Every structure is written in C-alpha cells, then in structure tokens.
Image: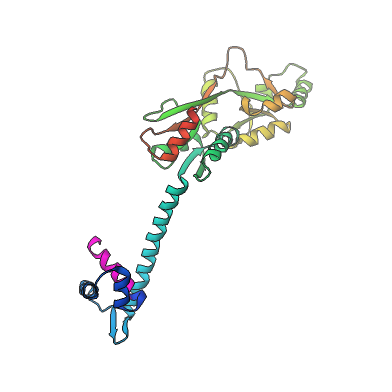
Amino acid sequence: MEQHLSQYRIFFEVAKAGSISKAAKLLYISQPAISKSIIRLEENLEIALFVRTSKGVSLTPEGQIFYEYLQSAFSAIEAGENHLTKIKQFNIGKITIGTSNTLCKYILLPYLNNFVKENPHTMISIFTQSSDQTSFLLSENKIDIGLVAKPAKTQNMSYISIMEIQDIFVATPGYLNNLKHIFNNHFDPFRDGNIMLLDKDNATRKFIDNCIEGSKLQLNQSIETSNMELLIEFAKTGIGIACVIKEFIQKELEEGTLVEIEMPKGLSIPKREIVFLYDKKNINPSLIKFISMLKS
C-alpha cells in the first residue's frame, strides 16, 4: 500500500487535471516521471486507467471507478488532517464518562459545568447505566472515567473520592399518619408500610440487602423500580416508604415534605463513598485535565 500511495496521488491529480503536463506542474514532477508512474500503476493493476489523446488523457470506465474511490479516500485523509489541525489550534479533545442517571444529575453536572467553562472545545460523551456496568466499561477501556459508589475492590483502577452519601428510608407525614390511624399508633413502618426499593440488580439495592441480611427486619415491599428519581417522586406522592439517598432530598427534608424514618434499634446503614474511578495508565489529555480539575 505504502509503495503505491505516491502512484495513487499522481494518478488522482492527472485524472483531475485531464493532462499529464498540468499535473506535472501541480506536483513539481517531470512529465516523463509521471508517465512512468502511471504505466507502473496500470501494470500493477493489470488494467488500463487512461486513454491517451492528442489533447491529453481521459479515464477509462475502470479508471473512473478507481478515481471515485481515491477521491473518497483522499477527501477522508484531508478531513483527518483538518481535524488534527483544529485539535491543535483550538485545543479540542474528547472524554467519555460513565455514571448512573441519579449520580449524573446530582453530582456529575456541577463538575461538568466547571470543566466545560475551562475547556469549551472538549467533546464530552456520557454513558448512563448501573455502577456495575460503568465499572465493566472501564475495565474494557470503553470509557475514560466513571462516577460510581466505591466498589469493594478497585482492582488496578485509581480513584478520587468526591463525597459520602447516606441511604435512608423516608415517607410523607401524611402517609405515616395514615399508618398510625390504621394500626392505632402501634405500627412498624417497615412491617406495615409499603416499602419502595430499587430493583435487585441495582448496586444500591444490593448494598441495602447486604446491610439488613441476617437481621430481623422484614420489609413489606410493594414497589420496585430501576430509577432513584422515581423512588423519590413515589415517596413524595405519599404512596409508601422509599429507600433513597439523603443528600439528594435535602430540600424535601428541610421543608418537611418528607421525613426520615429511624432504623430499628441495633440496625444501621453505613455511609457510602462516591468516587471518580479511572485507569491511571490512560494518557488521554482531556482525561488528565479533568482529573486535575477534580483534584484541585
């Protein structure tokens, strides 16, 4: 391929100019050298590419087909060169980030706002899925960095701790009053209430299940969803008790729209650490800038 590339360029310019002499001036190559290059190309391909006339040259049907392919190829090369020039001129880069919908809304967006202000030409792709899937994509080098709850084993990944979150059970005052009315004040919210949880494949749900495993706590689950946002909205409508992240409903707790339900005596849910997880061997310049911003 490499040894024929110069021949392809010569063929392309001759075909475009319709003249060997014109192409020779454009390429700063002698006419005999151009003629010799075309003859070699035709011999290699074992097909005639030009018809020679007194006025110049014209393409054979086969030559026209070859010209169209080369036109696309050289256009792609030119576009690639222009793109690289723009990357250098405007400091354009690209970074791919993986996270869940919930962490994206409540945690990632403020960081993105700051990063984009400093790097307006950087292209950002965001993949939203479960934390487990984000970790998998990182291990497969399909994303640059992931925002997740810190896994038990980070393997070969590096991480930057962002914040701690607390999982709690909440409900509206109205819903709790209804339970009191039904059970004459002698009620157990976890036994008698409608408990709303994330689905069993969710990393947060697995964490909650592990926390209560082996305890006497019995959850009367009635609603299961894959979306934390929906859990929060379900709780606010007063249809049950939802397990949500405390830091994401601070406004509702302060206003009294939702109230936290105490865990049974002797049972607690530990806080979790939210981290940006990445491969320190990844030398993507945009990733390095993003990590620098996080650390600062």
Name the foreground residue: 185 vs 100: 100
- Residue lying farthest to the bottom in this orientation: 54
| Picture quarter with the N terminus | bottom left
Q: Is residue 183 magenta?
A: no
Q: Which residues are magenta?
A: 1-14
Name the foreground residue: 212 vs 139: 139
Q: Quadrant for residue 289, please give it.
A: top left
Name the foreground residue: 211 vs 220: 211
Please report the residue visible at 38 percent of the width from the left and 32 percent of the height from the top.
280
Position in image of residue 55 (x %, y %): 32, 86
Q: Is 285 situated left or right of 6 in this image?
A: right
Position in image of residue 233 (x %, y %): 68, 35
Q: Is residue 268 above or below residue 285?
A: above
Q: Is 225 situated left or right of 210 in this image?
A: right
Please report the residue visible at 70 percent of the width from the left and 27 percent of the height from the top.
251
Please report the residue visible at 54 percent of the width from the left and 40 percent of the height from the top.
116
Please report the residue visible at 73 percent of the width from the left and 16 percent of the height from the top.
186
Secondary structure character of the magenta stretch overall? helix
